[in-house]
Image (cartoon, coloured by chain):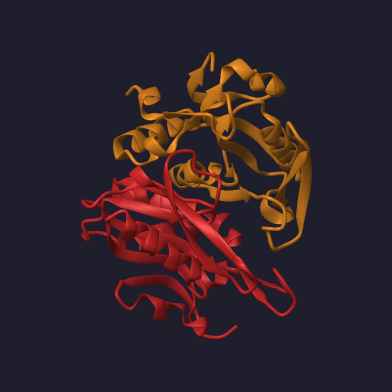
Chain colours: A orange, B red
Amino acid sequence: MDLKSKIRDVPNFPKEGIIFKDITTLLQDPAAFNFTLKRLVELSENKGITKVVGIESRGFIFGAALAERLGVGFVPIRKPGKLPAAKESESYILEYGSDQIEIHKDALDKDDVVLLHDDLLATGGTMKAATTLVERLGAKIAQLSFVIELSFLHGRKLFDNYEVISLIQYDSE
Amino acid sequence: MDLKSKIRDVPNFPKEGIIFKDITTLLQDPAAFNFTLKRLVELSENKGITKVVGIESRGFIFGAALAERLGVGFVPIRKPGKLPAAKESESYILEYGSDQIEIHKDALDKDDVVLLHDDLLATGGTMKAATTLVERLGAKIAQLSFVIELSFLHGRKLFDNYEVISLIQYDSE
């Protein structure tokens, strides 16, 4: 299936000059949704994964379904102030200012082998902070998984020590 | 399975005097996660559902997995400014001030039969706004589905015209 044909280009979002890759058109197509999940599962099987960690909020969509298909637990990484129990936080730099993500301290331990999932790899800042959180809890990272990779931003370079997979790549804007 | 035993009570979150029902302990338990999804699917089968609509962001977790299991598309309802294409917005009242949710205009049409999902039913304000958005696009609503229902808040009263299902009910705080 040509998954790229299921992604909608939205010009000038979130700001002038950016072409946004909109995944909602893929999600609302049952065959495309199912094919995407099946491909992600195939690429994550037999790696000893014990938990899928998904990044709020689009990373929850395939992240949770992946966990269910792999028969493992799901752990959300969330924006500040959303998780109720004891947690670890990590900041990362944005184009203007910075942001933060959080994980529950008891969500993972040293016996966990993690698949970290988000829908899109751009410059990689959020995922980098997520890898820091997962490793701070003592867990191992088996794979970083994305539906879309904006290859022209070279975010993958931040993750030389990990297996990085993506289903759809864009070499230019 | 006693699903209630998988939910963690967190006192004084998000503020003093509130006991927060934390679903993350259920999510990270593969058997509980699978059982929850299976029960939700059983309660939604054979209703002619064509789309699952999930409310950002915890509603994405089981919402997307439900869509996949039912073999239908998934549609996200999101917080303001997150959806890139043409959209409908609806405001709702919070304890202090108000908030807004949005849906893509082309996400649903008059032939769609919708399962609307969120993780938790409290006073029902967000879900009420979600039903307004879905019906404004001309779609029918077959079911409102929740994992947890805080019955003592009587949110269900807002939805007399719909089938409302929940897996875990709390009759008092």
Quarter of the image containing the C terminus of chain B?
Answer: bottom right
- Picture residue at 49% right of the left edge, 52% below the top: B61
Residue B83: x and y in percent read: 49, 43
Q: Identify which residue, B52 or A134, lies in the foreground.
A: B52
Depicted A3 relative to depicted A24: above or below: above
For this orientation, the residue located farthest to the front is A16
Question: In this orientation, does residue B22 appear?
Answer: no
Residue A113: x and y in percent read: 63, 39
For residue B165, side relative to residue B22 (left or right)? left
- Picture residue at 63% right of the left edge, 19% below the top: A153
Question: In this orientation, does residue B116 appear?
Answer: yes
Depicted B169 relative to depicted B41: above or below: below
For residue B88, side relative to residue A119 (left or right)? left
- Picture residue at 53% right of the left edge, 59% below the top: B100
- Picture residue at 30% right of the left edge, 57% below the top: B114
Depicted B101 relative to depicted B2: above or below: above
For this orientation, the residue located farthest to the top is A171
Residue B48: x and y in percent read: 21, 56
Total marks shown come to 0
Depicted B99 relative to depicted A29: above or below: below
Quarter of the image containing the N terminus of chain B?
Answer: bottom left
The image quarter containing residue A39 is top left
Q: Identify which residue, B77 or B23, lies in the foreground.
A: B77
Q: Identify which residue, A22 or A27, lies in the foreground.
A: A22
Residue B90: x and y in percent read: 46, 59
